[in-house]
Image: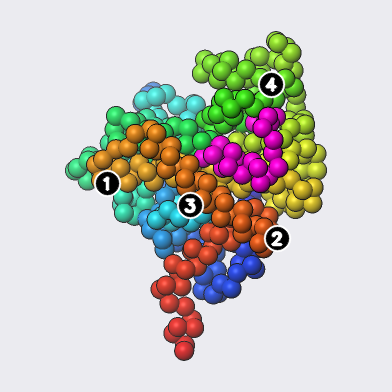
Amino acid sequence: MPDDLFADALSRLDQAASHLDVDPDVIEKLKYPRETTKVRLMIRMDDGSRKSFLAWRCRYDDTRGPTKGGIRFHPDASAQEVETLAFWMTFKCAVMNLPYGGGKGAVQVDPRALTKAELERLSRAYIQAFAGIIGPDRDIPAPDVYTNSMIMGWMADEYAQIVGEQVPAVITGKPIALGGSVGRGDATARGGYYLLTHLASSLGLGESLRIAVQGFGNAGQNIARLLAEDGHRIVAVSDSGGCIHRADGLDIGRLISAKSAGASVTARAGQDGIESITPDELVAIDCDVLVPAALENMIHERNAASVRARVILELANGPVTPEADALLEEKGVVVLPDILANAGGVTVSYFEWVQNRQGWYWTLPEIHARLKAMMEAEGEAIWNVSRQKNISMRTAAYVHALERLAEAIEAHGTQSFFTS
């Protein structure tokens, strides 16, 4: 992750503030994380040796409620990455009007190099280290990159053993049998799908779209599936193994089956008119909607000029750099920003937290209806801000969130209150 990622994130804050009459106290509070804790997790490996792993948990801002954010296991994890992701979560929760602040956690590890037993020990060690920081009213973790519902189940169980009682609301993204919510598995993609479908007419998109999906993990697979089910053509997809393209559309069901069997999407290259392409060729593919669903900074100043899509739907966090944003805006490409487009995940995590606390669980149609209503309402509001202020959708999303954050921060009193 680039050294200037956090600075890039803060530049979004400054840009949004320039469109609002915000008290300086608000900006001062949002420029820095409230707390970041760093620990070393020591676990026993299967061969009897002991090994340590760096781990972090950041609670960025809790003005609007307990902090909320995922835990990622990744070999390139860093404190700066965790703080940047927690900053984005702060604004994402405000965009959706959830009663949360932003948080994030990570362990610097390649989980694919661990056995399942080692992975469980590492997951439980994380909770042992951070049990005093997290809690259903203080900081609520969830899955992220290379973590899943089973890992969340281990973590929730470890927390229960430490505090001596079951506290399902301490962690979201759990297995259904352990208090998880139906609809959480595809929530990130489904939220983006609802947003794109709702704004399609305003964006000038037709009824039959050509879609390119960069990244074919959970979010990428589900957005491809949902859009294909509506009759749209998924013309290109990629994963860590490479990229493939078929102008007439790919068979998404077969690609998902191949991924489930452990193969790359490139295993289909050379069959049924499917060709291999490079990552830069995927970004430049002739399509209506480009969906970055992989990692940060995938669209940058060196490839943004080649984008031919009319709309970019950001399911990944931070996939477009500020420099690329400027180039895309000049080209007339509309970017539906991450803090709105991929907010379906945290929204259904919020639903899970609510259900855990009340002990009453909703049906899948109820989850989908609530998510759809919230994505459409916030998407419409941000679209209107964008048009009224003649600003990009990204800046409009930050303006929309900053208004809510500023109201909460100013409610505690600002300089003008204390000096008047």
Q: Are marks 2 and 4 in contact (CB under 8 Å)?
A: no
Q: What residue do we see at 61% from left, 67% from top? A: 17
Up-down: is 240 above or below 152? above
Q: State the residue position of label 1.
A: 357
Q: Quadrant of residue 176?
A: top left
Question: Closer to the observer: label 1 or label 4?
Answer: 4
- Label located before the other in sequence (1 or 3): 3
Q: Amino acid at mark 2?
A: Asn
Residue at the farthest bottom position? 420
Q: CA distance from mark 3 to mark 2?
A: 22 Å
Q: CA distance from mark 3 to mark 4?
A: 33 Å
Q: What residue do we see at 80% from left, 39% from top? A: 306
Q: Position of residue 152 (x, y in %)?
A: 37, 36
Q: Amino acid at mark 3?
A: Met
Question: Closer to the observer: label 1 or label 2?
Answer: 2
Determine which of the numbered discs, if any, sits on residue 96 in the image.
Answer: 3
Q: State the residue position of label 4.
A: 249
- Label located before the other in sequence (3 or 2): 3
Magenta stretch: give its range: 191-213
Q: Quadrant of residue 179?
A: top left
Q: What residue do we see at 24% from left, 42% from top? A: 359
Q: State the residue position of label 2.
A: 390
Q: What residue do we see at 68% from left, 55% from top? A: 392
Q: CA distance from mark 1 to mark 3?
A: 20 Å
